[in-house]
Image (cartoon, rainbow, N blue to C red):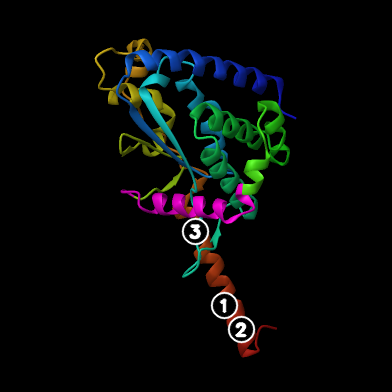
Amino acid sequence: MVSPSTTLFLSLLLSFFAFFSQSESKSHPPKVSIDLYYETLCPDSSDFIVNHLPKIFTTDLIPIVHLKFVPWGNAKLRPNTTTFDCQHGPNECFHNTVQACAIDIWPELDKHFRFIYCVEDLVNQRRVNEWESCYKKLHLDSEPIKQCYNSERGKQLELHYAAETNALKPPHKYVPWVVVDGEPLYEDYENLLSYICKAYKGTETPKSCTKVSYLEEVKAKNEHSDCDKEREDDTWRKMSSTLSAWFHKMILGDAF
């Protein structure tokens, strides 16, 4: 069951979208592109989506940004196949595909973001098994999503996001990996609003960008993400090495 606070936020979010959509249609400001490369069960990804990303919707910045979600993260394609494995297991592959389907079926940002937010809020609360409650809470039809992830369409969407993620220059090192106007923020992604304000080229500066807190010199975080690509690679290499050694002993007959 989705919490009352989540319900309230989603209702407020819808109101903000309605208000700023009207403003955008009148002024047509140039957009700052924000690309979010993430994986659905990564704690850092869910924390960013639930506790930091919504700030662009609760300020006057939403009309000047173009936000894109890329749910792939540190997943890996198996050699010479279209089969892939995810950092947090098959359940993450499933949820990555579900959210890819949501973006495809509900291309309007207000619809797919509310769904993604709702699910990631449950991930944050370690209640991801209740994710289907978001359909009812948001008055969304679950059938198109089910048809998508149970068909080849869901896999095609994920392979598209795989290609997009693997083409990043520089390559991503962890998730969330936030890119503003083509420039990665590295570990300073929590200061997203500052970067939006600095990247904006419009003639009318949003009021939020005049706040001192958004214009201060940003400082990179010292800690590494829990969903570090290199850390995952090292872990996989160690596991592979251990398994190879074990199989080698088994084949030679000296495992015991």
Spatial distance from mark 1 to mark 2, Cα to Cα? 6 Å
In the drawing, does residue 114 fall left or right of residue 138?
left
Instruction: Give the residue number, with chain letter if any, for mark 3.
Output: 76
Quarter of the figure with residue 98:
top right
Which residue does the image show at 35% across and 49% down from the upper left?
168
Q: Nearer the viewer, residue 174 or 178?
A: 178
Residue 48 picture location, percent across and down = 51, 32
Q: In the rendered structure, does residue 158 fall within the stretch colored magenta? A: yes
Main secondary structure found in the magenta portion: helix
Which residue does the image show at 33% across and 11% down from the upper left?
210
Quarter of the picture holding the C terminus: bottom right
Q: Amino acid at mark 1?
A: Ala
Instruction: Give the residue number, with chain letter if any, for mark 1.
Output: 245
**In the rendered structure, are the residues bearing label 1 and label 2 in contact, judged by CB atoms less than 8 Å apart?**
yes
Instruction: Check disc 2: other Cα within 10 Å, few if <14, some if 14-19, many if 20+.
Output: few
Q: Is residue 52 visible?
A: no
Q: Amino acid at mark 3?
A: Lys
Q: Secondary structure at mark 2?
A: helix
176 over 88 or under it: above or below: above
Instruction: Give the residue number, with chain letter if any, for mark 2.
Output: 249
Q: Amino acid at mark 2?
A: Lys
Q: Is residue 4 visible?
A: yes
Residue 67 picture location, percent across and down = 42, 31
171 over 135 or under it: above or below: below
> Of discs 3 and 1, which sits in the foreground?
3
The magenta stretch spans which residues?
Answer: 148-170
